[in-house]
Image: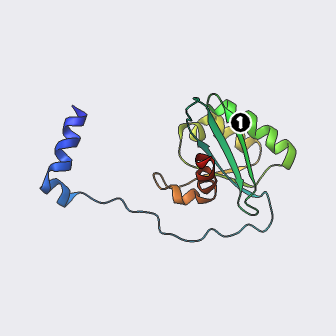
Amino acid sequence: MDKHVEAHVKCCHPCQLVAQPPRPEPMRPTELPKEPWTELAIDICGPFPTGEYIVVLTDYYSRWPEAKTLKTVTPATILKWLNSIFAQHGYPTVLKSDNASYFTSTQFKTTLQSWGVQHKTVTEYWPQANGQVERFNEVIKKH
C-alpha cells in the first residue's frame, strides 16, 4: 500500500507543486579546534559484502582517523571500542555523530556523559554536516 501511495504522489503533478523541497543545511566551514583530540566525529561504514561494518573516528584538528571492523553494530560494541581508543588518546571534549539509533540510544548518551564527553548530532539526512568522517568513509569504500 505504501509503495502504491508513493508511486502515485511521485506522478501526481499537483502533489509535486505543493511539496516542500528539503532545506539543506547551509554550507559553512567547521571551525578548527585549538588542539588535537578535542573534537572528534564518528560514523559507521557498511555493511560490506562480508556482512561486516567499519566504525570510523576522525579528529577534526589533525584529521587523524581510527577505524575498526565490527561484526555487529550496537551501542555496546561501539562504546567498548571507544573506551579502548580513549584509553590510548584520552577523552575528547566533543563527539559528533549522525542520528543513527546506536548513537542516539540512552546507553550511548549516558556513557559519553559519564566520560565527560559532549555528544552532538548533525542535521538528519545531510551527511555533509559530518563531512570530516564522511570523507574518510569514501576512502574506505573505494578500497
Residue that lies at the very extreme toward the front in this rendered image = 143
Write the residue at 16% across / 43% down: 8
* Position of residue 82 in the picture relative to residue 127 (left or right): right
- Residue 26, how many percent across, how many down? 47, 69
Mark 1 lies on residue:
79
Q: Nearer the viewer, residue 129 or 135?
A: 135
Task: Work out whether residue 108 or residue 43 is closer to the camera in this orientation and state it.
Answer: 43
Please indicate whether residue 19 sits to the left or right of residue 113 in the image.
left
Secondary structure found at label 1 = helix
Point out the image quarter for the N terminus. top left
Residue type, mark 1 in image: Leu
Q: Residue at x 80, y 49 (%)?
A: 91
Residue for point 80% across, 61% down: 36
- Vertically, is 60 above or below 85? below
Q: Position of residue 127 (x, y in %)?
A: 51, 55
Q: Quadrant of residue 80?
A: top right
Give the x, y percent position of residue 42: 65, 48
Who's the residue at 61% across and 50% down the image?
137
Label 1: few (<14), some (14–19) or many (≥20) C-alpha neighbours in 10 Å: some
Q: How is the image coloured?
A: rainbow
Residue 135 drawn above or below residue 82: below
Q: Is residue 26 left or right of residue 87?
A: left
